[in-house]
Amino acid sequence: MVATENPIEYEGTYPLPEAQLDRFLMKVVVDYPAEEEERAMLKSSPDFGRKSAQPHSVIQPVIGAEEIARLRAATHAVRVDETVLEYALKLIRQSRSFPSLTLGASPRAAIMLLQAAKALAVLRGHD
Amino acid sequence: MISVTPDEIQLIALPVLRHRVRLTPEAEIEGAHPGRLSSIADRASRDSPIDKMIAALSLLPTLKLIRLIALGVPLWLIALLLPAGWLAGLAYLVLLTALCWRDVNTIPELRSSARAVSCRHVSLSASISRSRSFY
């Protein structure tokens, strides 16, 4: 599941409770586009509003269901060394006693940290 | 077989943890943000009592030497006035050397143990600091 959050507009929405936020694997902050990207946006702006230029009409699938299943299986097969596991555990446990935090990471966060690290290892494709 | 490295844990830590932690009111007032935890952590480590203790320990041998020399000045003056005063002066010099030698041997041990505690305290900050490129 993917959810978006606009940091400026809150009307009709409410912040999610911590227990629900904990269900999300990660939060990716999307900042303003880079200057070059913004320039490209401006150059394509004459097409703005035209049906043929709508994103959903030009975006093509980049991956299929089978490929996703294969990548998920590859992620599950990634090995986690005992020392790396200890390191992740230490990181999570220290967040619970960190002076600037009143709420540290949950046990679910520890599991997801390892899962995300495994996925990153697959994407990097190293041994 | 692919395996996870500590570097990958560090890289992924901030995106995975930033929405799961909550700052203290003091940190929020200071304008902190979970995505910028590295700066808070760096400041916290600088201001920690353990680091202040390390700084004080590194000054200890110098302070002790100055204090002993200052205390020794009247003794040296008395020793000059008394017959065989050079003997008392020599004894004081031996005592001074022995005390300094003891400090030189004990202070590094104290400093390294305090440094180990401090490293444990700031290891989270170091990890988050390295993953700041994800923000």
Image: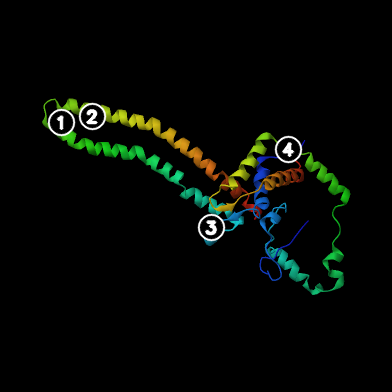
Disc 4 designates what residue? B3
Question: Where's residue B56, x and y in %?
Answer: 39, 43
Which subunit holds the residue at mark 3? B
Which residue corresponds to the image point at 44% horizontal and 46% vertical from the top-left? Answer: B49
Which subunit holds the residue at mark 4? B
Mark 2 secondary-structure assignment? helix
Which residue corresponds to the image point at 84% horizontal and 49% vertical from the top-left? Answer: A68
**Mark 2 Cα-neighbour bin, 10 Å: few <14, some 14–19, many ≥20:** some
Left or right: where B7 falls relative to B55: right
Q: CA distance from mark 4 to mark 2?
A: 64 Å
Could you tell me the amino acid type at mark 4?
Ser
Q: CA distance from mark 1 to mark 2?
A: 10 Å
Mark 3 secondary-structure assignment? helix
Could you tell me the amino acid type at mark 2?
Tyr
Task: Please give the label number shown on residue B27.
Answer: 3
- Tell me, yes or no, if residue A27 can be seen here: no
Q: CA distance from mark 1 to mark 3?
A: 60 Å
For marks 1 and 3, give the one nearer the viewer: 3
Which subunit holds the residue at mark 1? B
Which subunit holds the residue at mark 2? B
Could you tell which of marks 4 and 2 lies nearer the N-terminus? Answer: 4
The C terminus of chain B - image quarter = bottom right
Could you tell which of marks 2 and 3 lies nearer the N-terminus? Answer: 3
Task: Please give the label number shown on residue B118.
Answer: none
Residue under disc 3 on the same chain as residue under disc 4 = yes
For marks 3 and 4, give the one nearer the viewer: 3
Q: CA distance from mark 2 to mark 3?
A: 53 Å
Task: Please give the label number shown on residue B79.
Answer: 1
Question: Where's residue A59, x and y in %?
Answer: 84, 62
- Measured along the vertical axis of the image, is residue A97 above or below residue B27? above
**Mark 1 Cα-neighbour bin, 10 Å: few <14, some 14–19, many ≥20:** some
